Image (spheres, grey):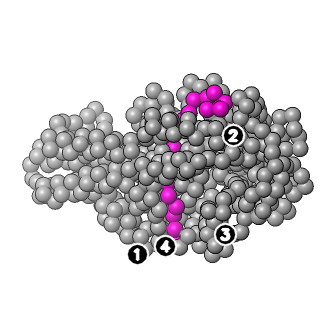
Amino acid sequence: MEFYITTPIYYVNDKPHIGHAYTTIVADVLARWRASQGEQVRFSTGVDENSQKTVDAAAKAGEDIRAYTDRMADTWEAAWRTLAIANTDFIRTTEAHHHEVVRTIWERIEAAGDLYKGTYEGLYCKGHEAFMKESDLVDGLCPEHKTAPEVVREENYFFKLSAYQEKLLEFYDAHDDFVMPAHRFREVRAFVEQGLDDVSFSRERKEGRAEWGIPVPNDPHQAIYVWADALVNYISVPGFEGWEHHPADVHAVGKDILRFHAVIWPAMLMSAGLPLPGQIAANGFITNNGVKMSKSLGNGIDPLALAAQYGNDAVRYFLLREIPYGEDGDYSETKMKDRYNADLANGLGNLVARVLTLAEKENGKGTIVRGTLDPALDRAAMATARTVGERMASFRFSEALAALWELVALGDRYVNEKKIWEIADDAARAAALFDLVSLLEAIATLLAPFMPATARAIDAAMLWKDDVLHATKPAVLFPRIS
């Protein structure tokens, strides 16, 4: 079995923020989960360099644009390494191979009769790198970037998106889980049902705008519009043959770019005669203490600083447990500390410490040997594994972790009820400890996609030699934070 998952490719006009990290962590968890099920996983992320934002950012930094993009691409790659993201591919849209694939897609769409040249005047939001309608604005401003779009009039190539309205609706009817969660799919469908306009697929190449990017084939005065270029990265990673053999199973995105992925992208693929992806999974936004993050407010959250303070796994746990997938979520230091202390320090960390402290005392006695797990614990572990699998399949990460923490709570109750430290009989004490160690092994296995370093630490503390356990109490996994 194969599984191909992607994140968006991120603009290089700034460093990663917590929203980028959230989307990427979601993809990482799904990739690790599918790998744990024995599938061959391809997990792609990368950076979008062919945008006007890049031109502006390089100019602001006073750098040569190529040097700037190289530096920022390194920054993003390093960030994902620091956060232990296990991507198999990292694509840059300045790569020659990507340019070739983009030009080929353009030529296929053109051959299908779905491109034409025309003059357009509209409201262009530089933040979105997209044209907007008056109805999209709030008090004349882009609701996300809080800036007034500029009126742009120029000659561009247009993609006949309007010709694909019925085809998209037919596809949605045949694939009722194409967008997850379901309420996001309803939003997409309602948007398409209202009617689609043709979309600009190029920008004029002139001083100060669009001189950077991929030239339109046979028309060097036009640059391929950044979204018509960026979406194609999902094909550039495996190549045409790879995509036709196995298109992406999941595109993990933020809700702000859902329409590009669930409307324009499948229409492009239909026009180019290529298979469509399996699902688009869209997460919501993260606020900081209830306030939308912005550069002007200076309230952005640096995921690397957060991970340095709490640890990668704690940050992963908080984001996945605190925010129901698809909904907007809020970060605050109070919420982070509460989750950390209650669920990690007092919950999982405490259980691991209690069990392995008791097990370590048995080292050299040869008393904890592989045996038969308590039937009640065995049933609970298997039921939890089924529940976690079902919830992962529908992107309910918070609920999957809640089920796993019920198993943690069961382990704590078992310790309290058995009072292992009071059991004098070696065989009875060893049997109870075997049950608990086995439960920890089950927890670590299910936990690995969510909190890989923690799962490895638990497993490393339980070494079996000739079916005899040699336990080591690990360093405190999650020291309490005051």
Report the Cα–Cα distance between label 1 and label 3: 42 Å
Q: Give whichever of discs 3 and 2 has the lower sequence position.
A: 3
Which of pointers 4 and 3 indicates the residue nearer the eye? Answer: 3
Is residue 363 shown to the viewer in this render?
Answer: no
Residue 413, image x, y percentages: 18, 57
Q: Earlier in the sequence, mark 4 or mark 3?
A: 3
What's under tag 2, amino acid-wise? Lys
- Quarter of the image with the N terminus in it: top left
Residue at figure coordinates x 58%, y 41% from the top left: 165
Q: Is residue 251 visible?
A: yes
Measure how far apart labels 4 and 2 are at the Cα level: 40 Å
Residue at point 69%, 45% (across, down): 198
Q: Which residue does the numbered mark 3 point to in the structure image?
A: 141
Give the quarter of the image for residue 52. bottom right
> Any magenta on residue 277?
yes
User: What's the CA distance linking mark 4 and mark 1?
Assistant: 23 Å
> What residue type is disc 3 on?
Leu
Q: Amino acid at mark 4?
A: Gly
CA–CA distance in space, label 4 to label 3: 21 Å
Pointer 4 or 2: first along the chain: 2
Q: Which residue is mark 2?
A: 160
Range of magenta residues: 270-290
